Amino acid sequence: QVQLVESGGGLVRAGGSLRLSCAASGTIFSLGIMGWHRQAPGKQREFVATMRSDGSTNYADSVKGRFTVSRDNANNTVYLQMNSLKPEDTAVYYCYVVRAVKWDDYWGQGTQVTVSS
């Protein structure tokens, strides 16, 4: 089992920045993929960004150029730096990891990000 603890959400004005963190613990083995999804009120959960163990990244078109995903493998932590935030970025942000050995996924509890106009 893997436990994920997220932090860094909050309220920010449009154009501002926030940095989310997600620390993994438990029976980790190797984390093949670490990343983020988000869910806005009344909408389905959507992909935001991922980073593989080889350092390759993938972003949703809506956040490209504004968000940056990174990871600290030594501490099993993934980050999401969010710049130039827009009201439409308001959502609950969920981190997730995929263990490389078992290829199973785990999700964090979610952290609220609210961007005011």
Image (tube, rainbow, N blue to C red):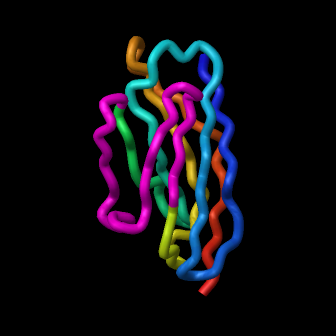
For the N terminus, the quadrant is top right
Asked if residue 35 lies in the magenta stretch, the reply is: no
Vertical placement of residue 106 versus 47, above or below: above
Closer to us: 104 or 73 = 73
Q: Is residue 32 above or below residue 7?
A: above
Residue at image position (66%, 74%) is 12
Q: Which residues are magenta?
A: 53-81
As rendered, which of 26 and 17 lies closer to the eye?
Answer: 17
- Residue pushed farthest bottom? 117
Q: Looking at the picture, how far across and down is residue 56, in whole percent? A: 29, 40
Q: Quadrant of the C terminus?
A: bottom right
Residue sitting at x 64%, y 70%: 114
Give the residue at x 64% y 48%. Answer: 110
Residue 56 magenta-drawn?
yes
Q: Is residue 23 left or right of residue 65?
A: right
Residue 38 against residue 105 in the figure, above or below: below
- Determine whether, in the image, residue 58 is placed left or right of residue 102: left
In percent of width and height, residue 13 lies at: 63, 80
Q: Is residue 50 above or below residue 75?
A: below
Residue 98: percent from the left, percent from the top? 44, 27
Judged left or right of residue 107, residue 103 is left
Rendered location of residue 53, percent (x, y): 36, 29
- Across the whole image, how many numbered discs are drawn on residues? 0
